[in-house]
Image (cartoon, helix red, strand yellow):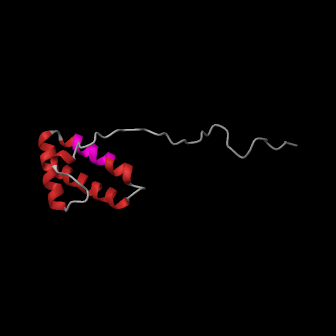
Amino acid sequence: MRSARRGGSRKRGVSRKRKTVIKVSLKKGALTKHGYSTKSPAKVRQTALRKAVKASSPGTVIKRLNIIQVYNKNRSPKVAKIARSDMAFVRKL
């Protein structure tokens, strides 16, 4: 007769997933110097994003908006939603 395995019910060979914390910093004023604010109406934000794309590449603007979206998705979902819609706008440019 076989004895019961000790040490819990964890299967052999299966590793546990761990959350890794990756800190990405966003320079203060990177988008605000072009007039961007999540509190502004959509037209104002879009003109500011056009200025930011002219100053730098669309990829860097998308990355900056993504950082804003990720950092605010739990703290303030409304801001995250605005940043996500602005990312979609920049992709269409």
Q: Is residue 30 left or right of residue 19?
A: left
The front one of 12 and 43 is 43
Judge whether residue 93 can be spotted in this image.
no
To which quarter of the image does residue 80 belong? bottom left
Q: Above or below — where is 79 with respect to 56? A: below
Count all numbered tags in the image, as a single digit: 0
Q: Is residue 57 magenta?
A: no
Q: Is residue 37 left or right of residue 72?
A: left
x and y, in percent, of residue 35 in the image: 17, 51
Q: Is residue 65 magenta?
A: yes
Residue at image location 22% in from the left, 41% down from the top:
59
Judge whether residue 66 can be spotted in this image.
yes
Which SS type dominates the magenta stretch? Answer: helix
x and y, in percent, of residue 56 in the image: 16, 39
What span is in magenta?
60-67
Residue at image location 54% in from the left, 41% down from the top:
18
To which quarter of the image does residue 82 belong? bottom left
Q: Residue furthest right?
A: 1
Q: Quadrant of the N terminus?
A: top right
To which quarter of the image does residue 44 belong? bottom left
Residue at image location 38% in from the left, 58% down from the top:
76
x and y, in percent, of residue 70 in the image: 37, 49
x and y, in percent, of residue 78 in the image: 34, 61
The front one of 69 and 11 is 69
